[in-house]
Amino acid sequence: MAAEKDRIIQKVGSAGVVGAGGAGFPTHVKLSAQAKVVIANGAECEPLLRSDQQIMALYPEELVRGLKAAMVATGAKEGVLALKAKYEEAVSALSKLVEKEKDLRILKLESVYPAGDEAVLTYEATGRVMPEGGLPLDVGAVVCNVNTLINVARALDDQPVTHRYVTVTGAVARPSVFLAPLGISFIRLIEQAGGPKFPDYAVISGGPMTGEVVCPMESRVSKTSGGIIVLPEDHYLIKRKKMPLSTQLRRSKAACCQCTQCTSVCPRNLLGHHVEPHKTMRSLNLGLDAAEAPITSAMLCCNCGLCSFYACPMELSPAQVNQAIRKEFAQAGFKNPHLRRDVVPDREYENRKISQARLVRRLGLAEYDRPAPFDPVKIEPKRVVISLKQHIGVAAVPMVREGEIVKMGQAIAQSPNGKLGARIHASISGIVRKIGEKGITIEREGA
């Protein structure tokens, strides 16, 4: 069994598999741990995104194979396929496979936000609450996104990560899910979806809650790019996300009415963690020097955005404030003091779950909450710029030279020995035109 564990980890590492759910943690490192259960995260809790639910229905065998491999690598005795009950095609496809496996089960989740948060999902799947500042591994669990596990299965067949399933939606003519080569420009995928409906538009990379507004001309698909959302430039959500931190801090000090609604809906607070955004907001005028609990608890924030985009009647952003505090503490070398392990969920946990449909309406996205079917078209860009840092850890170091001819799937960059990182592979065949800060530029021959 040890030899098989080593083989799986080696294959996954060589293929450059990282967490596809957004964080980008190198999967070969995650699978090196020992766990009791592996949870396949198919919740896809961000509104408008459609990729995971479709690949679960299209590739259930690969998903189950990847899950089983992760269980072997971690020594887990149980595998849980967690997805929303409304993903009926995926549930049906997976049920036929799971009924043959005694160590696998399907967990049907409610359509709430944030169902895919690792603390929430771990609790729903195991009944155990992660300790403050902890990980699912602290309660014997490893959580992997379903796209990650499909990549694990493909890695066992020596298929490296060269493409990414991406939802392109919002104010576009044909919302779609594409299998996009790493390094392709966002603007090319937006054009593939029929182009924007408005001449003046903005783009969110990721989901509407946790994603960031980016420049579509400069942004490129990476291993963690789950969604590209096009919205009118004057949309409420775009204006909120573009608001500078300095403005948010100034408004927060002046306008927070201490209604406590942000704390009431905080998913980590409901699980029993000492996160109270309203008290953090109240403490802003005190500064960070005292390091009192109300402000240090910002280090437990999961940045789901419910406090900012759903709860606050004053349109403040506790999540943005929390992230700024976390950044400042990290730069100062301050460690999280909140480490309680005897965490018990609030008795209102079930009653305060936020319906995704209601969230969509609150965000002003109801008209864009449309199907985005998988488009099997093969996208072949003439040029890609592949980032050297698509993962948690250090940037990969180029293994190729400018002018070198490379083949799709060829390793072109590798993280330094002993450093946390992941291998990078060419997503198209062509000539290495440039190696720079933005990444490795490859052009097709004759382009």
Image: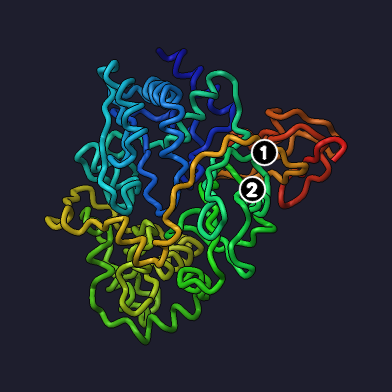
Mark 1 is on which residue type?
Ile
> For residue 197, which quarter of the picture?
bottom right
Mark 2: secondary structure? helix
| Residue toward you, 207 or 405 | 207
Q: Are marks 1 and 2 in contact (CB under 8 Å)?
A: yes
Mark 2 is on which residue type?
Gln
Q: Position of residue 91 (x, y in %)?
A: 32, 32
Residue 430 versus residue 204 in the image, above or below: above
In the picture provided, is 213 more to the left or to the right than 128?
right
* Alpha-carbon span between mark 1 and mark 2: 9 Å
Q: Position of residue 110 (x, y in %)?
A: 25, 46
Residue 306 versus residue 340 in the image, above or below: below
State the scheme by which the image is colored: rainbow
Residue 119 versus residue 323 in the image, above or below: above
Give the position of the C terminus as an image quadrant.
top right
- The residue carrying pointer 1 sits among few (fewer than 14), some (14 to 19) or many (20 or more) residues within 10 Å by Cα, namely some
Residue 104 visible: yes
Q: Position of residue 249 (x, y in %)?
A: 44, 79
Which residue carries the number 1 mark? 379
Q: Earlier in the sequence, mark 1 or mark 2?
A: 2
- The residue carrying pointer 2 sits among few (fewer than 14), some (14 to 19) or many (20 or more) residues within 10 Å by Cα, namely some
| Residue toward you, 162 or 377 | 377
> For residue 181, which quarter of the picture?
top right
Give the position of the N terminus as an image quadrant.
top left
| Residue toward you, 109 or 17 | 109
Q: Residue at x 50, y 79 (%)?
A: 246
Q: Residue at x 77, y 42 (%)?
A: 382
The numbered dot on residue 192 is 2
Q: Residue at x 18, y 48 (%)?
A: 342
